[in-house]
Image (tube, rainbow, N blue to C red):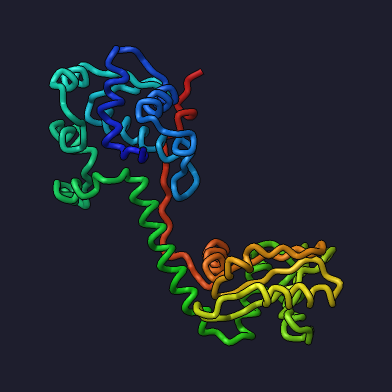
Amino acid sequence: MPIPDYQSVMLPLLRQVADKKTYLFKDIVELLGQEFKLTEEELKELLPSGQAFLFSNRVGWARTYLKKAGLIDSSKRGTLAITPRGLAILKEKPKKIDNALLRRFSEFVDFQTYKKEEGDKASSVEVLQEADKQTPEETIENSYQAIRQSLAQELLDTVRRLSPLFFERLVVELLVRMGYGGSIKDAGKAIGKTGDEGIDGTIKEDKLGLDIIYIQAKRWQAANVVGRPELHKFVGALAGQGAKKGIFITTSSFTKDALGYIPRNETKIVLIDGVQLTQLMIDYNLGVSPQRVYEIKRLDSDYFEEE
């Protein structure tokens, strides 16, 4: 079944602690995973950032919201227990517990809203209801992914308009930023000077130059897909240089046949298409610049431990 959203977790979570016992958060995650019949794969699914498990994160936000509404208490680190208010809510036998129900409590309303200036509530109930579909962390992450995807497409369109020589230099600069080669000056010497078919440049595998990686860079439009014959030519060019390692980068994409191609000799080639290229450019800040940085902070429980 689909991983439930954090509001769908609220009522089952409250029921799990209805016996008035104190539970460890990790145990609650496990119990709820069993109740929702989630598979191992679903339990291991990560947030877009890859920094946390999606289901556990949603259980964590459900716990936070229930705590802010006064339905549970988690005064002890990593634990939670039901409160008299939580028991009272369960006695009402609600069909679900969501943010709309929790807004009956002023503490929760104060938690969900913020102030631009003293006395000025910046968020209306309508805005809050629209934000109910995702946890705040998911909203940030999904918005970030949308912005990144838009930037990647803009980058790809720009790169496809570059001259072939500029694109070749861009590729080498990216590889240098990724840790290959010694410097842009050293790495760029071979650009356009090898005179060998299928090779646009070379770069040192490491700063000591113990091995050389040969580069093929194709600045092609989306419709011009790289097929297996192009890879055959590249591998042949590598063999002519006595080389064993190559990187084939294109602004378009590779055919299924090309992606499945494995050279018969010991030659190793890495394929990077337009989508991967722009993601690497963003990761290594090539052709892009940071506009705004947000820090997501959490309580440092260890700091408050008393000896």
Residue 45: give x, y in percent of width and height.
Answer: 46, 41
- 191 versus 176 height, above or below: below
Residue name at image x 72 percent, y 82 percent: 191
Figure quadrant of the N terminus: top left
Establish if 297 lies above or below 14. Answer: below
* Residue 247 occupies quadrant: bottom right
Q: From the viewer's perspective, tell me whether residue 200 is left or right of residue 2.
A: right
Rendering coords of residue 170 (x, y %): 61, 76
- Residue found at x 33% / y 38%: 4
Q: Is 184 rendered above or below residue 38?
A: below
As rendered, which of 272 and 76 lies closer to the eye? 272
Q: Is residue 286 visible?
A: no
Residue at 40% from the left image edge and 26% from the top image edge: 34
Q: Quadrant of residue 292?
A: bottom left
Q: Position of residue 198 (x, y in %)?
A: 73, 80
The reply to whether residue 117 is in sight is: yes
Q: Is residue 155 left or right of residue 88?
A: right
- Residue 74 point in image, percent of width and height: 34, 23
Q: With 10 as the anchor, is 60 left or right in this view?
A: right
In this rendered view, identify the residue nearer to me: 207 or 293.
207
Residue at 43% x, 22% y: name it.
Answer: 27
- Would you place residue 166 above or below residue 97 in this image? below
Q: Choose between 13 and 225: the one closer to the eye.
A: 225
